[in-house]
Image (cartoon, rainbow, N blue to C red):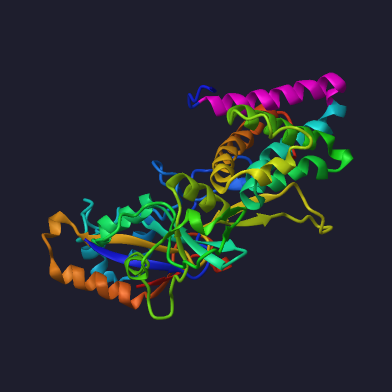
Amino acid sequence: MNIQHLYLLSPLHTGGTTQEGNLLGIARESHTNFPYIPSSTIRGRLRAAVDDNKRDALFGNDLNSDNGNLTQGSVWVGDGSLLWLPVPSLSHGVIWISCPLLLNRYARVAKVTSQTAIVPYLYNFHQANEKVYLKDAIFDSSELINWDKGQAKKFTPHQSNVAIERALVLPDQHCATVIQMGLWRQVKIKLDQHKTVDGGFRYEEAIPPDTLMYFPWGITAQAKGNQEAGEQFQDLLTVNAIMQIGGQESLGRGFVECF
Amino acid sequence: MPNFDPRTLNKCAFEALTNLRKEHQKLVPDFEKAKKGLKDQKNQAMEIYTYLSTWGLMRLKAEEKAISKEQDERRKVVKSFFKYLQELAERNDLAGDDDLKNFVKLSANEYLGLTGLAIELANEFGFWANAVYHDITGAQ
């Protein structure tokens, strides 16, 4: 299993099933309710970027191809999962949050071993007697646990120009609440010919820029470890170091840096 | 202890909005005249989720006082929301007129927990608004 990290350069909107009231929600994992990128979204984007002659071999054919039977490709792509999400903080500007559920999932997929157990309230920007403001909540430094910077680094993968400096691990349930409050949300209105608001507000959600996500990928069992396919897919990822995922490309949404 | 059958939140939202609608229609029996108030109720019920997610629980509580007098039906929805939240959270210090100050006293743990519950309840308000006010068109 290989892993590809995605650092969001702009808000990322993946249409979801949530459409309560006046809200256009985003795709969420059914078992955790955390926002995610469906694997088909990533796969489709990469499939469209590959040369015609390699497309069917890597990703399988489509229904319109001459061969009436659908065939499986040599690579599989997993869902994009959250790792760190930025939240505004009065005391620290921006703090990236995550939780044991997301970090342990990452540890399993990325084969990261941690000397210390991932527990709630770990943070890597410890300063004695300094309070940490996170949206409406305030944490006293005595409530937080110092996270060794070397250990924290294993969970904050980065490229030279992208670094997550302030990381805080929240309990799973609070992380879900703060993520909900930290989502990028845009109010949309429709104007009529007199430029007055026609109807009411509508809201659209997106995963905010500067979020760090990742997705696993590998070679399908059918391809039996086809090394060439793996190399071709890796090349494809390298060529698409910045790619666009999800909807609303015309509004500049969904640009991500891959590493 | 409230029964946390998955339908509990549905019931709270449905009950809250149905009662508000009934009360308003009792005050204004002519449906055509009642439409404005019902539309305000529907709009507010749909708005709670995004308002809460964007601005937080304390500011939503402040809305109870901040909403203009002409939009009293909107205020009633917010008041009713806190009444049901208080019931679900088994507290008695959230729904009163002067209870805004109580939110400051909560620990980060309590406040975030309460916000999580409130977001779930607000989600149900947004959903049930469409069912309860199915005959109100032109709303969000």
Q: Is residue B125 at all visible to an observer of this figure? A: yes
Residue A242: image location, x then y, percent: 41, 74
Chief SS of the magenta region: helix
Q: Is residue A168 magenta?
A: no
Q: Please, is residue A53 above or below residue A114 in the view?
A: below
User: Seen from this angle, which residue lies furthest left?
Assistant: A224
Name the image quarter holding residue B67.
Answer: top right
User: Residue drawn 29% across and 70% down?
Assistant: A52
Residue beneath the point at 31% across and 72% down = A237
Quadrant assignment for the N terminus of chain A:
bottom left
Q: Percent position (x, y) of residue A172?
A: 43, 47
Q: Where is B104 relative to A134, above or below?
A: above
Can you give x and y, in whole percent of width and height, for residue B130 in the image?
Answer: 65, 33
**Front-lying residue, A133 or B69:** A133
Q: Is residue A53 visible?
A: no
In the displayed structure, does residue A142 sit left or right of residue A100? right
Magenta part of the protein: which range? Answer: B7-31
Residue B16 magenta-drawn? yes
Image quadrant in which the C terminus of chain A is located:
bottom left
Position of residue B45 in the picture relative to residue A247 (left or right)? right
Residue drawn at (63%, 37%), measured in percent from left and top?
B126
- Residue B73: which quarter of the image? top right
